[in-house]
Amino acid sequence: MRIELASSPGSPARPNEDWVSVSLPASGQGGTLVALDGVTPPRDDAGCVHGVPWFTARLGGALVELSGSRRELTLRDVLAESIRRTADAHRETCDLSHVRTPQATVVLVRWGGPDRDVEYLVLSDSTLLLESPEGAVRPVLDDRLDRLPHEALRTHASADALRNAEGGFFTAAADPSVALRAVAGSVPRGGVRSVVALTDGASRWVDMFAEGDWAACVALLRKEGAQGLIDRVRELEVAAQARAAAVRWKLHDDASAVFAEL
């Protein structure tokens, strides 16, 4: 088994709000992958005294613990209970009803021995890739944000109206029921050679800069590693800035990649 993780902040002036982890049990049978992309509020008035990095660390830790210790729970159940635990940890000090309360995108993967399925869950715009033994790559995407008209997201006010709302898009914040909105499923372990999780700062190599398709992205990760992919994204961002090309949202974003060859 080969595991590689890398994470890079979008700016040295701000903390990295991504959170990634791979947990392998002592038995050597199976594991858990978690990748979270914290949602940066436009201002520091999101009703929480802790901030996004605190939230992603709390939520990520709960996801790792529950997905490994509570095998009887589905991944939707794991996400719901992890959100509940995290909300309870700051319910007394923070306004969890605020639309910009700390929140995150989620990729969660769990696998067991050869006779168990690989389970997966994706919420919001981080990317999961499943590579077959033959090299075919299947992206698992929650594309609700991408399907919204660009005009609807032009201002923070209009985007907030669509956040965790019917007809909009969903993130892990303070409401456990959002777990029901996640894209979830499973595939036989024998049908998976590797799994990849990318926050949207790393998936730019494909979905913004079009340097290759998802299969080429997995091949790059296998050859150059997780940091190699992020380094290439940073080079593309700098080149885009030099030619005054438009970069969606912001020039540099927190970027994280996890490559797990099973």
Image: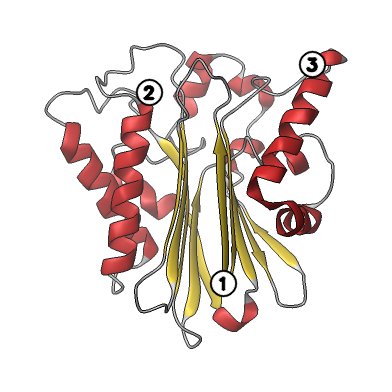
How far apart, in angstroms, are the residues tagged by discs 2 and 3? 29 Å
Query: What residue is pinned by disc 3?
Result: 241
Q: Residue furthest bottom?
A: 115
Residue type (three-letter) at the residue carrying disc 2: Arg
Dot 1: element:
loop
Instruction: List x then y, in percent, for residue 16.
Output: 47, 29
Q: Is residue 243 above or below residue 101?
A: above
Residue type (three-letter) at the residue carrying disc 3: Gln
Q: Is residue 112 above or below residue 137?
A: below
Determine whether, in the image, residue 251 is placed left or right of residue 156.
Answer: right
Q: Residue at x 37, y 28 (%)?
A: 52
User: Looking at the rendering, which quadrant does residue 218 occupy?
Assistant: bottom right
Pair 2/3: label in front: 3
The colour scheme used here is secondary structure
Instruction: List x then y, in percent, for residue 23.
Output: 40, 61
Counting other residues with Cα less than 10 Å from the Cα at mark 3, is it few (<14), some (14-19), or many (20 or more)?
few
Question: Looking at the image, which is closer to me, 126 or 9?
Answer: 9
Instruction: List x then y, in percent, for residue 202.
Output: 65, 40
Counting other residues with Cα less than 10 Å from the Cα at mark 1, is it few (<14), some (14-19), or many (20 or more)?
few
Q: Considering the image in quadrants, where does the C terminus appear? A: bottom right
- CB contact under 8 Å: marks 1 and 3: no
Give whichever of discs 1 and 2 has the lower sequence position.
1
Dot 2: element:
loop
Query: What residue is pinned by disc 1?
Result: 1
